[in-house]
Image: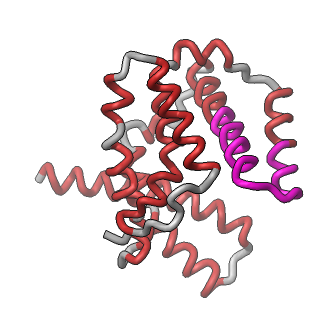
Amino acid sequence: MYPWDNVITQFWFLPTLFLLFLIAPILKYSNNSIVDACCLIVGVLVHCYSLFSDIKIFNITGVLFYMVYFILGYMIAKYKAVLQRFVYYNCQTLIIIAVLNTAYLILESNDAIKFLLSLVNSYFVMLTAIFYVNKEYKFLDFCNGYYYHIYLLSWLPLKIVIILGYKILHINSEFLYLIEFIAGVFIPLKLKAVTNLLLRK
């Protein structure tokens, strides 16, 4: 009931996602772009003005905070064909995104600025995904069908790497980020492979 007071706080996102998915039917079965726009505007206002910011039960505060990103992701999927006309992958775009992120690290910013920057970086992720598909790259194909397993099971290997690397071995943090990334992706994949094998037997 209180995800941030749970034994494994890293699973706070499970009840949060569950509650967010309860609003998905509104988005899915709405054939009206005005309803979609209203949902998005409400999400932006709740997010930027931190409305209902102290409701800990079921992480309602977190649900409302992240709702705008959930709605936005749904809108991107729903209107993908239209949005792809405005997606341009070039050096100038990457430079602008890098400059904006650098400015964010240097300058003080409020919630609205953070939200705008998160939109910019979401655009960058979409650019990268489209670029990957258009170029017909295959080097990430080993992850196909396992994204949720990586998302769900990465916390344990990450914790182990952090404890061993930071606390015991005192490994350089930049190098440790690489180890964390590798462990967070490949250990869940191996765990899933072992689970599949056990289920088959």
Q: What is the image's colouring? A: secondary structure
Relative to residue 63, is residue 169 depicted above or below?
A: below
Would residue 115 be counted in the magenta stretch?
yes
Who's the residue at 79% across and 23% down the image? Answer: 90
Q: Is residue 76 visible?
A: no
Q: Which residues are magenta?
A: 100-124
Relative to residue 196, is residue 172 depicted above or below?
A: below
Q: Is residue 74 or residue 40 the one in the foreground?
A: 40
Who's the residue at 65% across and 63% down the image? Answer: 177
Image quadrant where residue 116 sits: top right
| The N terminus lies in quadrant | bottom left
Residue 69 image offset from top left, x and y in percent: 53, 42
Image quadrant where residue 88 sits: top right
Residue 51 image offset from top left, x and y in percent: 55, 55
In the current view of this chain or complex, which residue is farthest to the left? 201
Q: Is residue 41 left or right of residue 121?
A: left
Principal secondary structure, stretch drawn in magenta: helix
Q: Is residue 64 or residue 11 the one in the foreground?
A: 64
Q: Is residue 90 or residue 109 the one in the foreground?
A: 109
Q: Is residue 141 left or right of residue 181?
A: left
Residue 161 image offset from top left, x and y in percent: 54, 73
Who's the residue at 56% across and 23% down the image? Answer: 133
Residue 49 image offset from top left, x and y in percent: 63, 52
In the current view of this chain or complex, which residue is farthest to the bottom? 168
Q: Is residue 40 visible?
A: yes
Relative to residue 125, is residue 183 depicted above or below?
A: below
